Amino acid sequence: MNIENALSGRTIEAIYTLYGASIEKINFEKTNPDFEGDLTLVVFPFLKVSKKKPEETAAEIGNYLKANIPEVASFNVVKGFLNIVISDAYWLDYFKSVDGKTFINATLPENAPTVMVEYSSPNTNKPLHLGHVRNNLLGYSVAEILKAAGNKVIKTNLVNDRGIHICKSMLAWVKWGNGETPESSGMKGDHLVGKYYVEFDKHYKKEIGELISQGKTKEEAEKQAPLMLDIQQMLRKWEAGDPETRKLWEMMNGWVYKGFEQTYKMLGVDFDTTYYESNTYLLGKDIIDTGLANGVLKRRADNSVFIDLTPDGLDEKTVLRGDGTSVYITQDIGTAVQRQEQFKFDKLIHTVGNEQDYHFKVLFLTLKKLGYTWAEGLYHLSYGMVELPDGKMKSREGTVVDADDLMQEMIDTAKATTLELGKANDLNEADKLHLYETVGMGSLKYFMLKVDPKKKMLFNPAESIDFNGNTAPFIQFNYVRTQAMLRKAKSGAENFNVHDALPENVTMLPKEKALIIKLYNFNATLKQAALEFSPALIANYVYDLAKEFSQYYNETDILKEENKELVAFRLHLSNTIGIAIKDAMGLLGIEVPERM
RNA sequence: GGUUUCGUAGCUCAGCUGGAUAGAGCAACUGCCUUCUAAGCAGUAGGUCUUGCGUUCGAAUCGCAACGAGACCA
C-alpha cells in the first residue's frame, strides 16, 4: 500500500495507454510547498512521446491517474508539473496503522545479512580526542542505523596496543615517572600515559636539537638520538616476549583501558568484540605465501613481496618487507580473512578517516586479487577530519581538543543553561544530573552527526556548541512538549490514555497532514541512511520533524480544543511524533529526557 | 609533481540519483510569555551557488578547464 509505487506503476500504464510508449522507471517527487499537492510528476521527459504541450500531457496523465487510483483526490497542472493531491483518507489510514507504535522493527528478518562495523580503533598511548569522538559517534550510529534497517550488526573495535609509539610512553614513564600511577596522581589512566607520550617527545626533540648542533643532518639526528635507539631496543624486547617489558606494557595498557572504558561509557558507545593488534600483528604472512604461490604476488630482488596494482591505476604495493617483517597492510589482510572465517560477514565496514582512503582502496583491491570473493562486501566508511579554526589537531604538540574535557564542558554548559532558564527545578538531584548529561552529550553528538560524514568539519572551541536552533536540545525540547501534554491530558479532565482508540472521522489541518507525511517518510529516510551510511540524513529528518511539530504546537490548540475528538486525535498525533523523535534520536545515540 | 575530496548567505550546514521563485540554524534587527514548557513562534534583512565553457526543454546538481582549500603518495 505504498502510494509512490501505485503512482509510478499507473503512470507507466498511462503513458503506454495514451501514447503507446513504454517507460521503465518513473519518479515522483515531493511537491514544492508553494504549490498545492503532495507528490509531483515532471512531465517534460514524456513530451517526445506525447507530442503534445506540457500542460496537455500533464492533464491527460492526471486524468488517467485520478480515474484509476482511488487515493488520488485531485490534481493540478502548472507548466510541465503535474501536482497530485492524495486524499486525506489515505493519510489518516496510514496514521492509524502507525499510531502509538515504534518506527523501528526490533526483530530481524530470518535472512538478515551480517554486517561488522569496526570503529574507534584507538591507540593506547594517548587519550581520545575530538577526532576520535567523531569516529566513535559515527561508527556507533551507523551500526544502530544498519541494525534498524534489518541487518545483524557486530560492532567491533581494533585496539592498536603495540608498536613503537606505545614504547615511547613506556620508556618515558620508566625514565621520568618515579613510579607514578593513576591512583597516586589522581589522573585518568589514559591521560597519565598520554602525559608520558608528550614527555618523550619533548626529550627526544631536545636530543635531536643537540645532535644537529653537533653537525648532523636532521635525518641522521632523528635516527641516532639515544632515546630513539632505546625505544627500538624496547620494541625488540617486547617482540621477543621479555617478561619485564611485557609486564610494564600490560600495566600501562591496563591503565589506559580503564580510562577508555569511562570515555566510552560517557560517549554511550559499546562493542560486541574487541581485537588487539598485539594478537593480530603477525597475521597475514601465510596468505602472502599462498599469494606468491599462485602468482598474484611477486618477489623483488631485495626479497620484499609486492602486488602490482598499476593496471588499476594504483601503484606497486609492498605487502611484506625484505626481512620478512609485516607492513600495515599485511596484518590488515590477515585480520580481514580471520574475521570472515569467524563471522562469515556479508559486509565489513571500516570507520576510518579519509586520510586513509588510498590505503583501503589498495587493501580491498589486493584482497579481491587474492581471490576472496567476499572482499566485495568491504567498505571504507571514510569521514572528514575535524579541524580547529587554526588548522589540524596534533597530539604530539598538544593542540588537541581532549574528548573527556570536551564532554565535561558540554555537560557543564547544559547545567548552566538549565539553571539560567530556571528549568528542571522540580527534579531531584539524580534526575538533574542525568538531564545535564542528556542535554550536554546530546548537543555534542548531534553537532557532530548532523553534518555529512564525508565532509570535513570545523569545530570552534571558543564558541561553545549552541543549544538553540538546529540542535539536540531543540529536538529534545519538542519531545518533552509531547510528553508534558500527554501527562497533563492523562491526569486532567481529558483523562486521555495513549491506548485509547483513535477517533474515526476527523478533519485534518494542513499542518497535521504535513506531519503525517513526515512520519510516513521515516522508513524511507532510515533506508536511505543505511544505504549511504549517513546518520546526517536521520539528523536532518528529525530536526525537520521537530521543527514542524514546534510550529504546529504554537499555532494549534491541542488540549484547549473544544472538540473532544480533535483533542484525542491531536494527542495521538503528538504521541506518535514523540515516538518518532525518540526513535530517530536513538539511532544517533542521543537520549531524550521526559522533562527539561 | 601525481592521486583524491571539496568550494552554496558574514559564520556553520541542508539541498538525494538534473526540475518550479536555492533552504535552515547562528549572528543582526522587529514583534509575541496571566495561555498545552519561550531551549520556543512569527517576521525583516542577507546569494553572480568560486569562475568560464559545454551537454539539456531545463544545471547549485552532469562533463571539461581554470582558480582556491584539504588529505594521501613521492
Image (tube, coloured by chain):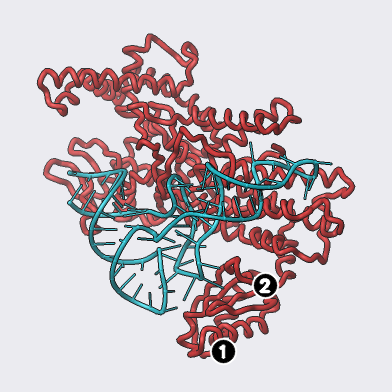
Chain colours: A red, B cyan
Q: Disc 2 sits on a residue from what chain?
A: A
- What's the mark number on residue A86? 2
Which of the pair A509/B49 is nearer the observer? B49
Position of residue A291 relative to residue A273, above or below, is: below
Amino acid carrying mark 1 in the image = Thr
Position of residue A346 relative to residue A393, above or below, is: below
Pinpoint residue A124: horizontal percent, then vertical percent.
Answer: 40, 28
Q: Residue furthest left?
A: A215
Question: What residue do we see at 63% from left, 52% from top?
Answer: A547
Label 1 Cα neighbours within 10 Å, binned few <14 / some 14-19 / many ≥20: few
Count of numbered circles on the image: 2
Question: What residue do we see at 79% from left, 66% from top?
Answer: A507
Judged left or right of residue A15, residue B18 is left
Residue A397 placement: quadrant:
top left
Judged left or right of residue A541, residue A124 is left
Secondary element type, mark 2 = strand
- What's the mark number on residue A506? none
State the quadrant of the N terminus of chain A: bottom right
Which of the pair A79/A314 is nearer the observer? A79
Question: What residue do we see at 47% from left, 46% from top?
Answer: A117
Question: What residue do we see at 46% from left, 40% from top?
Answer: A134
Q: Earlier in the sequence, mark 2 or mark 1?
A: 1
Residue A72 placement: quadrant:
bottom right
- What's the mark number on residue A17? 1
Position of residue A247 relative to residue A285, above or below, is: above
State the quadrant of the C terminus of chain A: top right
Q: Residue furthest top?
A: A178
- Do the residues at discs 2 and 1 belong to one chain? yes
Q: Disc 1 sits on a residue from what chain?
A: A
Judged left or right of residue A105, residue A343 is left
Label 2 Cα neighbours within 10 Å, binned few <14 / some 14-19 / many ≥20: many
> Which is more foreground, mark 2 or mark 1?
2
